[in-house]
Amino acid sequence: MLLLALLLIPVATAAASFFVRRRKEMEAANLVGFGLVFLIAIALAAQVLARGTVSLANDFFYADALSALVILLTALVALVCATYSIGYLRDDQQSGELGDDPSGKEQLAQLRMYYTLTPLFVFSMMFMAVANNLGVMWAAIEATTLVSVFLVTFYGKVTSLEAAWKYAVIGGVGLSMALFGTLVAYYAGHQLAGSDALVGLNWSVLAQHAELLDKTSMRLAFVLILMGYGTKAGLAPMHTWKPDAYSEAPVPSAAILSSAMLNCALYGLIRFYILTSRSLGPEYPGRLLLLFGLLSMGISVPFILVQKNYRRLLAYHTIDHAGIMVTALGLGGALGTLGLTLHMTFHTIAKSLLFLCAGNVRQHFKTDLFSEIKGSVIRVMPLTGIVFLMAMLAIIGMPPFSLFQSEFLIMRAAFDGGHLLTGVLFVLFGTGVFAGALLHVGGMILGPRGDTPVAPRRPWRDGSLLTLAATLVIIGFWVPAPLLELIRGAARVVSGQ
Amino acid sequence: MRPFLDMQFGDRIITLMAALVLVLQIAVVAQRWIVTHIRIFAIQSFLLAMIAATIAWFNHAPHIYIAAALTLVVKVILVPIIFERLVVRMDIREEIKPIINVPLSVVISGGLTLLGYVVAESFYKQNEPGLGHNELAVAISLFLIGFFTMINRRKALTQVLALLSLENGLFLAAISLTYGMPLIVELGILFDVLVAAMVLGILVYRIRETFESIDVSRLRRLRG
């Protein structure tokens, strides 16, 4: 029942936002809808902790600890971003970013598009996380791209069209490879009994009989899936759409794209990793994952060092972190997988927080470039400045923040597992990112005093910033026992131990 | 023996149609007009639907008929209509200028077909029931040539059509490897294809409005 409600509420929210007439009603619909989704996600997590797995409709919908974790994180980001976007879009409307049609009809149409597409976007991510059938999961991931394309073109600028085009085409090519991979995996399982029926492509069935899968086909399937879902996760060298899409989309959408949707793409990859490692042993997929993970981390370093645009800087950070998580998956074992699920949790919170801070800065200073921000952010906008700096320190892995723990765990997994080169490169790239991020963001936030007046209070946006910031700080010191159990459970799903 | 019940005869028909599908894909590489490209795509999709129907007939697998009918509706009728209307609205008459010239492109496509056969060989098992490996080889070749077309052409609409022909290759691979995906998956995929065609169509239209051209090599403002 929970699974069904999880899917129906976002659809109902989208429908409500589409049909109501006033801005306030759309905002309320989104807020209520995502609030309910978040409550259901918590209830689902509790149920999964109690029962192990939850399934519905003859196993068509299926949730284990890994899905519950991804759903919980998605619901959290969606709720915070829904709150944030109320203040953000009102500001955009007043400052004329949405066009200057005097009757206000055009602005309202744009707001309606935003408030309708966002719940649909969340719906497709939820659908992906609860779909047991790998083909249905693919269709849901493709749907996330199709829905979010028009969020990227939201401002209708020349550059946002370019970003959306790259996003749609590169994403489309990547996903067609992922579909090929799914197909080959289906073929790999076609000797299993009952494989002609719908269940033949069910992850739970394939995972149970993983040792019977055709090994040659699984090799090919994993390469195709890695390229396909890797494109969606923005792994190098298929990452080029990412900085463009993140810097052109409205900030709350970019926050969802860079945290929740990244988790979804990784989720698809993880599901196939589990099948492949059970069928062929962990070495084969592990080596490929390490290659792509380290490459993504390595490529992001120079771009972070020379970056002039802070939203693109954050996008390259996401590429770096996608690389970190894929590396953790490649290392595997109990430590690596725990590092992966912990990092996924911490990164989701920290990265969405960073984007929301960047949104505040962008709306006040009207620029995306470091060089044009005159006057230190921390003086003009004290709260945003402090939170921004804190989140930045967290994301580059400074202790005592939580990402330090997960990255340390991944590093330990590398050295314990005898992956010396991986460990060394991990530290090296981490240092590069560290230097680049501090250099730029530190200068922007703590820079010399300018004459920009102090910004007014922004209740919607500051409230959502503070909620996320408090969460980030608290889980750095104390992860609530049920959440920790969920994270450990998800890691056990991945490692199979 | 009546030919319409004989499996061998069915195999031969299917192989013939698969060969035509491949020829059409190479024809796309060789021709230079967008409208022609759309029509070739429609004919290719029609042949795929026929292949699916033939397989359904000879293997007594009624669920493949539904997949064939859906393909017919979506890829032979809806998508070409959407794109032809787009072409009329945007008034595109210009030729598509490929990056690599036509004769060389055709030679490269031939090489990619060869590669398709090599890859398909590893799937082929002598003693297993199923279609010949010709169909799989054609499917992989369609996929590779589709990739090549996307890289080689700069017009936005051509790239979209090439992306859709990648999907055609996948459809052929699906029916030749496993007699199609489960129906609900097939439905999901076709729905996504239809929505993708519309989304990309709208994007192409807006790019045309903004840049006065659909040459995607002009989209180069976002760097670094």
Image (spheres, rainbow, N blue to C red):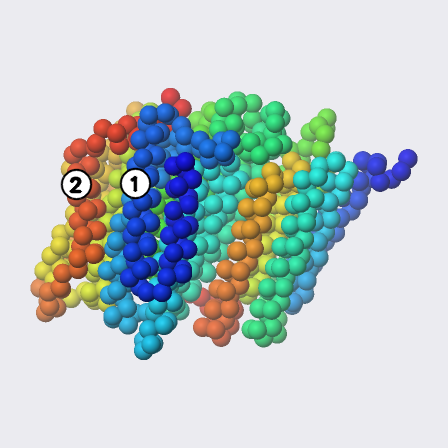
The answer to whether residue A359 is seen in the rendering is yes
Q: Amino acid at mark 1?
A: Leu
How far from the left and from the top, in percent, is residue A205?
A: 52, 27
How far from the left and from the top, in percent, is residue A109?
A: 38, 67
Looking at the picture, does residue A44 appear above or below residue B93? above
Mark 2 — residue?
A: A473
How far from the left and from the top, in percent, is residue B4?
A: 84, 40
- Picture residue at 39% right of the left edge, 48% below the top: A10
Sequence-wise first label, 2 or 1:
1
* Image disc number at residue A146: none
Q: Amino acid at mark 2?
A: Val
Looking at the picture, does residue A80 appear above or below residue A206? below
Instruction: Report the quarter where the C terminus of chain B lies.
Output: bottom left
Instruction: Report the quarter where the N terminus of chain B lies.
Output: top right
Callout 2: chain: A
Mark 1 — residue?
A: A39
How far from the left and from the top, in percent, is residue A186?
A: 57, 34
- Picture residue at 32% right of the left edge, 27% below the top: A49
